[in-house]
Amino acid sequence: MTTTTPAANGGLAGVPLSLTPLTRKDFTSDQEVRWCPGCGDYAVLATFQGLMPQLGIRRENTVIVSGIGCSSRFPYYVDSYGMHSIHGRAPAIATGVAMTRPDLAVWVVTGDGDALSIGGNHLIHALRRNVNITIMLFNNRIYGLTKGQYSPTSEQGKVTKSSPAGSVDRPFNPISLALGAEATFVARTVDSHRAHLTEVLTAAINHPGAALVEIYQNCPIFNDGAFDPLKGAEGGLIPLTHGQPITFGPDAAKGAVRDVAGHVKIADVAEVGLENVLVHDAHAEDPGLAFALSRLTDTEGLRTSPIGIFRDVQRPTFDDLARAQLTVQADPAERLEKLQQQITGTDTWTV
């Protein structure tokens, strides 16, 4: 038995829900999980399999599309519909699924190399168009599947098999990139922070339109401990909570403020006063502050990095708008005639 989520239920509007209780086992496939021991992907998979029963989405109405990379094995391990597609093209394929099947919850699983290198344009335009898909971008700052080459998020100077003298590329900041593409939902979380990961993914799938969640994910073989400086009591993870002052560190002693030039920077709360610490507004229509906060990410030494929901705003979705155009032209004969007119055209010439 199923029911359909109401239209007010964000990104799950129209997706059938199960009336019978679901468990993690329902979303666990019979495939052997083939990731390296200690890989952060295990934590994300376990969180996902635990989250789906809470959402109540049926397996039959769940689709996971992946590209190429270690993270892209994800569809094999979830007992739902899925597709292991081609390098970088998962957002394009997921767009087609979302366009034709509004009754499906469509997930994209990708990595920093898959999404930001060969798949860069597909990612940007899926976000720009606000297609109703949820993108999990696993970022381990390395190419893992191809055995340890530097990736678009690797820091400058990174010594790898493909950069023996150190990478000279400046790394991408995926959050800044998404905000620059006018994405309506942009967030970041960490593989080992299961409660935070669950909270962010829940908000993402309930968001109508394109949602990007960057997940810091450890690769124990080729880039072990890449995010260790951010973790622990002394780490530089900056939690973003809508409506709350942006503070972090032991006793919330550090905070985000604007300097006299208007730039966002980190300061000691005791020196500037809590009243001068910025209050996070994830629902601000102007993405300027969210972008400024994304720049607090130290892409080199990883001493600081905000996590949480940077932006969550409402805008009509690409697939809903496209389907509305077809509804206006409901008569099949009329639609066929207009299609023929488009094909034939009005500008003809003789060669």
Image (tube, rainbow, N blue to C red):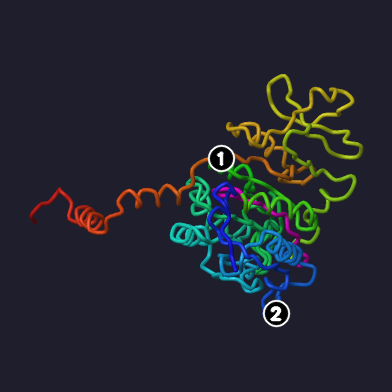
Looking at the rendered structure, the secondary structure element under dot 1 is: loop
Under mark 1, the amino acid is Gln
Q: Are marks 2 and 1 in contact (CB under 8 Å)?
A: no
Q: Of 150 and 58, which appears nearest the observer?
A: 58
Residue at (89%, 26%) from the top-left corner? 270
Q: Which residue is mark 2?
A: 32
Q: Which residues are magenta?
A: 207-221
Q: In the picture provided, is 337 more to the left or to the right than 70?
A: left
- What secondary structure predominates along the stretch shown in magenta? loop
Neighbour tally class for label 1: few under 14, some 14-19, many 20 plus, Cα within 10 Å:
some
Mark 2 or mark 1: which comes first in sequence? 2
Q: In the picture provided, is 47 more to the left or to the right than 84?
A: right
Whether residue 210 is in magenta: the answer is yes
Under mark 2, the amino acid is Glu
- Can you give x and y, in whole percent of width and height, for residue 1 in the image? 60, 69
Q: Of 16 and 3, which appears nearest the observer?
A: 3
Residue at (81%, 32%) from the top-left corner? 255
Q: Quadrant of the C terminus?
A: bottom left
**Residue extending furthest toward the top:** 260
**Res. 342 visible in picture:** yes
Mark 2 or mark 1, whichever is nearer to me: 1
Q: Which residue is mark 1?
A: 314
Disc 2 to disc 1, C-alpha distance: 40 Å
Neighbour tally class for label 2: few under 14, some 14-19, many 20 plus, Cα within 10 Å:
few
Q: How many marks?
A: 2
- Can you give x and y, in whole percent of width and height, for residue 172 in the image? 62, 47
**Res. 170 visible in picture:** no
